[in-house]
Image (cartoon, grey):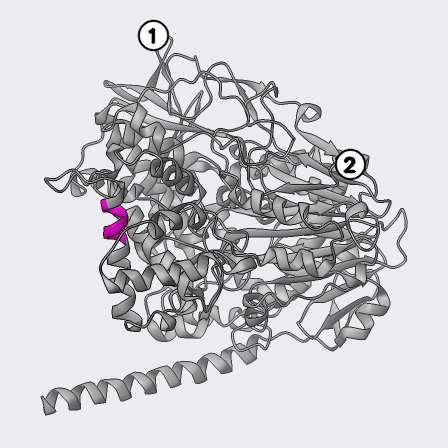
Amino acid sequence: MRALARILGRLLVFGLILLLAFGVVGYALAQRARPVVAGEVTVPGLDDEVRVWRDGAGVPHIYASSPHDLFLAQGFVHAQDRFWQMDFWRHIGAGRTAEMFGAGQVEADAFLRTLGWEATARTELADLPGPTRDILESYADGVNAYMADRSPTELSAEYAVLKLQNWGYVPDRWEPINTLTWAKVIAWDLRANFEDEIERAILGGTLPAARVEELYPPYPERHPVIAPGRPQAVAAAFSPPAPTRLTPLLARVVERAATVDALTGPAGEGIGSNNWVVSGERTTTGLPLLANDPHLSIQMPSIWYQVGLHCRPKGPACPYDVVGFSFAGAPGIVIGHNDRIAWGVTNLGPDTMDLYIERVNPQNPDQYEVDGEWVDMEVALEQIEVAGSDPVTIRVRKTQNGTIISDSYGPLEDFDQKAGVGVPPDHAIALRWTALEPSTVIRSFLELDVAATWDEFRAALRHFDIAAQNFVYADVDGNIGYQATGRIPIRRNGDGRWPARGWTGENEWTGFIPFDELPSVLNPSRGFLVTANNAVVDADYPYHLSSDWAYGYRAQRIDDLLATQPALTLEAMSAIQFDSRNGSAAEVVPHLLAMATNRPEVGRAQATLRAWAEDGDEAYQQRAGSPGSALYAAIWRQLLARTFHDELPADHWPEGGSRWFEVVRLLLDDPDNAWWDDARTEQVETRDAILTASLLAALEELTERFGDDPSEWNWEEMHGAVFRNQSLGVSGIGPIEALFNRGPYPVSGGTSLVNATSWYPPDGYEVTWVPSLRMVVDLADFDASRALHTTGQSGHIFDPHYRDLVERWAGNEPLPFSWSDEAVAELTVDRLTLSPR
């Protein structure tokens, strides 16, 4: 034992020395890559001087006299702070991550090349109007001006670590195409019912269709829709369960999609966002207030980059005067305001992805059936360059319904045998998705940045065709509005909820919903508009948008809070963003409290739940230090596992979001429903048996973790937010991860709450999705506005702005969202002049 202790002690000392060494080296590398933010820098390509003023959080405001100089400077500044992130993102978009990280990324690249984002983006680029293309080129010139004469390690410390695996890697010049491919990655991140469609089909292979439908209940009529009225009527659907023999094929699609999610962030019910806008009739200022908090996967650095873009002077030749949040790698502002209007976005989530089961000719795998005849597929070869290995060539096949996404490729031809399943050789899965067709979304953002009226706002959104969004709007004249966007298909039959027969043509797309017929609202009589990924349209709407909305729990909570506050302040709007009331707990806890028990530990647990449920305005709030929050989360996790894990495949266990809120709510009123029975036991369980078992298991978990005193149970210690670098932060090498990752940070909130710090119950309580920014805009006084994103402006480890926003974000302490020249000057701490050569 003493010898073992000595060995462990030496290993600990060695580990500490190694960690210290990595820290010292990392610090030195980070200092080498930190950009110059004060003084004067010569930048080739500029026509005139550009001012870049940064505040104490590192947020830059860029002042230029022409669009060319403005966007060149934005590219330069993005590259200063985030070039590694930009480089990594463009490799995802192009399906070239194996060029950076080696053979382990070949499968992800194979799927990305199958989707063909870069080829689509090249078509887009050729079709862009001249002014938009000019801006993309100016932006690229700015990025390249920063890259010039800098070695990779002078761009970012990550390149030094990458050299351990890929010594010869040197980043390419930035090209406009790199910006367009990143838009496709964002569309993938915001995809809607892709997984739901697959899950229905897989579950339909082993469960009766009626039981599958119980897991996808209709949108609750008691919850709000964005356009007033009842939820959208569901059209007659083509919905046969998939034959059991096709289940491995569908599972292969899930497996391949997961390789991309490992790079971009997990899909699931965390996806979403909140936004709302209130007219001046309901605010203390007499003009609108607008709020937005997009929910995206947790990552390091932040997905957002805050910036101000100012033409001086502003005029027809240089019309930009806008502040807000951008993506590093793209020009312009995505969310924010200019001198006339403000806007915010949430994911609309329409069904723009359809899966088709294709019949493949058993005698020729490059032919598929159409109306009883074999037709040739389009076949192309793609070569994947692999760091440290030989290139890999894959075959990409396409049908009239889309790209085949269920193919294996060279090194993984035996995947299905290794996995113990056999994919039927005479079938394949094709995907049709609007984001696989040329897009004009970049043009939309750039036009949105200069829009000054409701009509100009809507004109800009006509070009917003992929990753369809709910836009809310406000202007300085007092108008508020809502506009749905996106290229949304019209189907010959069905509603896209299940994979369709590709060989019949009965479920093909016949066109897209015209923009002027997409839902739109201007100045509603109730004085506010709320969107939270809930149902958009009423029963009379003539087109099908989706059957897979978020179930309205967040939307209802925001609606309730706005309706009960007739004189809203900016502070009240910000407080709503941090509201953590759990709508599911309000349904489940009364049943737990009604359970009769003689066990003292159960009685103490019920007392903890009762105190939480009866805590006035704090009732059911999942606050960081709350014992009731901790207990309920543990019960909810156990309840989902004990109710559904026995009959659902592990890949389809409940994610715990609003759909499961609604599923459980309906089951609570049906105590003998078959879902309550645990198929793994001989007896037949009912609702009360499962509730009791879930409570007892939760008590055991919390007692083991915190002790048996409920006052010591703490949600914040269970529900930590770890911000991980998307690339090196998941390397599996402790010292490297310690350099690039930060956390855990204790946070309030939970899944499908307004404060949506989501977690995935099968894995535990760690945060997976977050409000990636919080913004409240005051149209009466732009300088009174407040905003904040998650981590910090910088992508450089050990830079003061790498993680300086995290605690403020976790505590909902937003910063001034400066607008006027005077307000910006007052907060400026670093002044940089970019001078032409």
**Residue 831, visible in the rendered structure:** no
The residue at the point 61 percent across, 54 percent down is: 327
Q: Is residue 85 left or right of residue 651?
A: right
Q: Is residue 599 above or below residue 536?
A: below
Q: Which residue is mark 1?
A: 372
User: Regarding mark 1 in the picture, which secondary structure is present there?
Assistant: loop
Q: Residue at x 58, y 19 (%)?
A: 511
Q: Nearer the viewer, residue 535 or 359?
A: 535
Mark 1 or mark 2, which is nearer to you? 2
Cα distance in 3D space between marks 1 and 2:
53 Å
Secondary structure mostly seen in magenta is helix
Name the residue type under label 1: Gly
**x then y, percent, for residue 427:** 28, 23
Q: Which residues are magenta?
A: 689-694
Instruction: Please give the label number shown on residue 213.
Output: none
Residue 237 in the image: state x and y as whole percent: 43, 18
Q: Residue 523: which numbered mark, if any?
A: 2
**From the viewer's perspective, is 546 left or right of 227?**
left
Q: Position of residue 132 (x, y in %)?
A: 73, 42
Q: Nearer the viewer, residue 392 or 49?
A: 49
Task: Report the label total.
Answer: 2
Q: What type is the residue that disc 2 sits on?
A: Asn
